[in-house]
Image: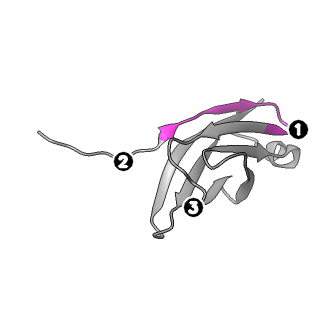
Amino acid sequence: MASIKQLPNVLDISLVKGDDFTFSIHSSVDLSTSQLHAGCGDQTFKITPVSVYDYNITITKQQTNNFVHNKSWTLEWIDSNNEHRTVLKGTIKAE
């Protein structure tokens, strides 16, 4: 039986409450014309382009202090055709 899937990759994050946390992602496609959004609930993480393929995502110490339980997070993009895609998802565990 044939099937087709478009599912996000999973990236779980473990961090220390009260610390700033920055990590990098690499895309195999040019995302320079896309809007990128990363966050957890009502918290939005800062996304900084390094190149058209590489981005840093920062979770601030104020945000990490708000994690009292494991939380789900996502990275989404909206391309130049206004098509939405969730490309990463995972759980944030703060210790």
Tag 2 residue:
6
Q: Nearer the viewer, residue 63 or 77?
A: 77
**Residue 86 in the image, given as x and y percentages of width and height:** 49, 52
Q: Mark 3 or mark 2, which has the lower sequence index?
A: 2
Q: Residues within 10 Å of mark 1 (few under 14, many from 20)?
A: some
Task: Tell me the element at label 1.
Answer: loop
Work out whether residue 40 can be spotted.
no
Q: Which residue is depicted at the point 88% across and 38% down?
A: 18
User: Which disc is residue 18 wearing?
Assistant: 1
Indicate whether residue 18 is drawn in magenta.
yes
Quarter of the figure with the N terminus: top left
Indicate whether residue 7 is drawn in magenta.
no
In this view, 21 is above or below 73: above
In the image, 24: left or right of 75?
A: right
In the image, 34: left or right of 70?
A: left
Q: Nearer the viewer, residue 82 or 69?
A: 82
Question: Callout 1, which amino acid?
Answer: Gly
Tag 3 residue:
34
**Residue 48 in the image, given as x and y percentages of width and height:** 75, 51
Single out the mark in the foreground, 1 or 2: 2
Q: Which residues are magenta?
A: 9-21
Kindly report the distance in space between the C-alpha atoms of the residues bearing marks 1 and 2.
Answer: 35 Å
Kindly report the distance in space between the C-alpha atoms of the residues bearing marks 3 and 2.
Answer: 18 Å
Q: Which residue is depicted at the point 48% across and 38% down?
A: 9
